[in-house]
Image (spheres, helix red, strand yellow):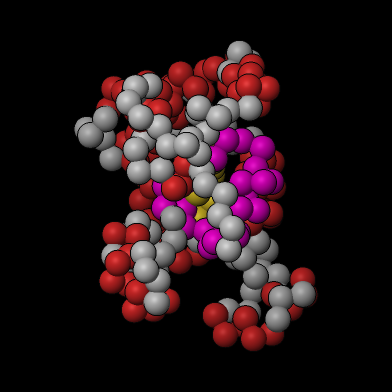
Amino acid sequence: MDIKRSCVDCGVGNCNWEEGSFPDFCLSTHMDQDVLAEAMEEYKKEDIKKVTVAAAEVEADNYLKMTRLEETIEFAKKIGAKKIGVATCLGLLRESRILAKVLRSHGFEVYGAACKCGTQRKVDVGIPERCDKVGFNMCNPILQAKLLNAAGTDLNVLMGLCVGHDSMFYKYSDALVTTLVAKDRVMGHNTVAALYQADQYYKKVYGSEG
């Protein structure tokens, strides 16, 4: 396979410091200046600037101090969010109830939508019947997004939606979305664990050389 090298192939990471050596495929040193200018122009918009500054301040002020949950709360406060939507997997309702309690203790209004709400059959939208083995009713991320849109949420927090379902929720959500939990039942929702074990896990399962 002919691989076009990019940032995921870099072992240097000097773009964070703007010094040192750079690989010959470095995106920074081989940048399309029109694309760069187009991206930077977006940061001049007031709503984008507000989010950009808030995100940077949360990172800088709380680096290695706060959990992601705490950082999410700080970010929500900085952007002036009043109502927070929770898009949750049905399997994480317990965790989402705890999240709602924490958010409400910080003065936020919380409105949630679970993935199975609407109770629509999978087969009715063309999902193969064999998928019923993990439940007859479909996950409905589009409905979740539309319900939170209708509720007028200022920021949506994603709680463990399935791969692909999360993609559709991002697409249809009117409000900004941040992810608190990425679902991985095998790894206890610690998705990066599979990467930390890549040398062992992937070689055994897929025969990969890493």
Residue 127's spot in the image, x, y percent?
71, 76
Q: Is residue 95 above or below residue 23?
A: below
Position of residue 142 in the picture relative to residue 46 (left or right):
right
Locate residue 69, reporting x and y percent. 34, 41
Magenta region, residue range: 159-181
The spot of residue 208 in percent (x, y) is 40, 71
Q: Residue furthest front?
A: 24
Against 65, residue 6 (above or below) is below
Q: Please state the total of marks drawn on the protein image.
A: 0
Residue 38 picture quarter: top right
Q: Is residue 209 left or right of residue 158?
A: left
- The residue at the point 42 percent across, 37 percent down is 23
Report whether 69 appears left or right of 8: left
Residue 128 in view here: yes
Is residue 147 shown above or below 105? Answer: below
81 and 61: which is toward the camera? 61
Taking the spot 62% from the left edge, 81% from the top edge, the residue there is 131
Residue 168 falls within the magenta-colored stretch: yes
Which x, y percent locates residue 57?
37, 21
Left or right of residue 162: residue 140: right
Q: Is residue 166 visible?
A: no
Residue occupying image coordinates x 50% and y 28%: 28
Locate the C terminus by quadrant.
bottom left
Against 46, residue 24 (above or below) is below
Quarter containing the N terminus: bottom right
Magenta residue check for 156: no
> Looking at the image, which is closer to me, 203 or 178?
203
Taking depth in this image into account, of 40 and 209 the one nearest to the observer is 209
Task: Write the residue at 40% across / 32% down.
Answer: 22
